[in-house]
Image (cartoon, rainbow, N blue to C red):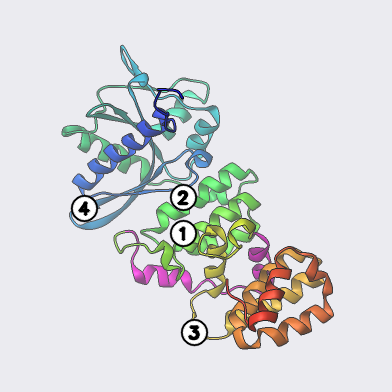
């Protein structure tokens, strides 16, 4: 037997440093009473989150995106190099709201740069050089605020939602998330245009809009967005049958039961379809109509996903509804999600997600 102690899993030091950098920046934000919100899919959109500034205890309406990096490897004799991929530089250049780079030099120094301005001025092939003059501390805080105000005033709306390029659409979707926290109209706009987006951007739009749904698993505090604002966004969750079919067709997490509590994306679709009226039959009728519409279009997956929700919400009427739909459309049984559903209803008389 070996006397050597068993080695545990390796820790990714770069990942740890990145998290420490974000934590250091978040601490500065809290000290200044700013609101910083991280986002999912940072690698896809070149942004770690969105920063809302305040005046006293009131939101100022000023919002910028930030990309945070950290570590001694960025140091140079004359300052720092903000290393980044060309893809990220393109996203920063074309971002619909200004993107600022934040660099943590451990243990206690932090610097900033206007990435959108820099890349537009110097091009995507130029290395991004940062000055030690732009320290995020003391008087540097005021300098950073001034730069953010100048950059954000007159910033273009989220016009990249109309782009033909998926990365730009996805970045604009998350910009709606950042801007929508203070002005819900950005999120209402996203709901209005979401079905014209690239499928990848559409999936992100579903996640973003879910933050305003009745899904308590993603409950947001009032300093993120007010209850009244979320209600306004949620009122726009009035889906047509075709839109419901599209939403159902995006669900794909079979390992976690499609709509179960561990199926994050499926739960997003679930709550979007529920909309603003959790008590009533509107969303039940919607999913029933979506099942038959999907079957008429040959969209077996969307039909199966809709069937799961429809029968789950029907409860006592599930057995009769299942018998009718399978008699008319036996091809549903070829989808992997349907046989377990049939077994559950035949055994217990109802289906649980």
Nearest to the observer: residue 57 or residue 157: 57
Contact between marks 2 and 1 (CB within 8 A): the answer is: yes
In the image, taking residue 207 as reference, residue 12 lies left or right, namely left
Residue for badge 1? 186
Residue at figure coordinates x 50%, y 45% from the top left: 41
The circle drawn on residue 175 is: 2
Residue 157 visible in this rendered orientation of the protein: no
Residue for badge 3? 279
Q: Which label's residue is closer to the chain start, 2 or 3?
A: 2
Q: Mark 3 Cα within 10 Å, few/some/many (few <14, many 20+)?
A: few
Residue for badge 4? 55
How far separated are the C-alphas under marks 4 and 2? 22 Å
Contact between marks 4 and 3 (CB within 8 A): the answer is: no
Give the vertical position of 99 relative to 339 (above or below). above
In the image, taking residue 338 as reference, residue 55 lies left or right, namely left
Q: What stretch is highlighted in magenta?
A: 224-250
Q: Mark 4 Cα within 10 Å, few/some/many (few <14, many 20+)?
A: few
In the image, taking residue 261 as reference, residue 52 lies left or right, namely left
């Amino acid at each position: 037997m070996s006397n050597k102690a068993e080695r545990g899993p390796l820790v990714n030091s770069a990942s740890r440093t990145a998290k420490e950098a974000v934590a250091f920046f978040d601490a500065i934000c809290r000290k200044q009473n700013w609101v910083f919100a991280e986002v999912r899919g940072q690698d896809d959109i070149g942004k770690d989150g969105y920063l809302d500034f305040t005046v006293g205890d009131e939101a100022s309406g000023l919002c910028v995106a930030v990309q945070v990096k950290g570590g001694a490897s960025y140091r140079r004799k004359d300052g720092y190099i903000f290393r980044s991929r060309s893809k990220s530089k393109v996203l920063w250049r074309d971002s619909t709201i200004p993107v600022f780079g934040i660099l943590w030099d451990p243990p206690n120094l932090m610097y900033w740069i206007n990435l959108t301005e820099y890349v537009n001025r110097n091009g995507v092939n130029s290395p991004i050089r940062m000055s030690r003059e732009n320290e995020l501390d003391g008087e540097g805080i005021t300098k950073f605020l001034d730069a953010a105000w100048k950059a954000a005033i007159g910033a273009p709306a989220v016009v990249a939602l109309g782009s033909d390029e998926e990365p730009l659409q996805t970045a604009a979707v998350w910009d709606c998330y950042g801007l929508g926290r203070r002005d819900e109209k950005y999120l209402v706009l996203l709901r209005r245009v979401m079905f014209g987006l690239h499928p990848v951007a559409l999936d992100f739009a579903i996640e973003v809009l879910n933050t305003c749904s009745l899904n308590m698993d993603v409950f947001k505090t009032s300093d993120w967005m007010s209850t009244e604002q979320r209600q306004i966004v949620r009122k726009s969750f009035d889906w047509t049958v075709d839109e419901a079919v599209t939403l159902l067709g995006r669900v794909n997490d079979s390992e976690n039961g499609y709509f179960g509590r561990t199926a994050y994306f499926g739960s997003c679709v679930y709550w979007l379809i529920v909309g603003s009226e959790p008590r009533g039959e509107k969303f039940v009728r919607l999913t029933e109509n979506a099942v038959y519409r999907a079957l008429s279009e040959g969209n077996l997956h969307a039909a199966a996903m809709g069937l799961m929700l429809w029968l789950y919400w029907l409860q006592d009427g599930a057995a009769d509804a299942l018998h009718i739909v399978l008699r008319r459309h036996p091809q549903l049984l070829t989808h992997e999600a349907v046989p377990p559903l049939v077994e559950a209803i035949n055994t217990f008389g109802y289906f649980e997600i």
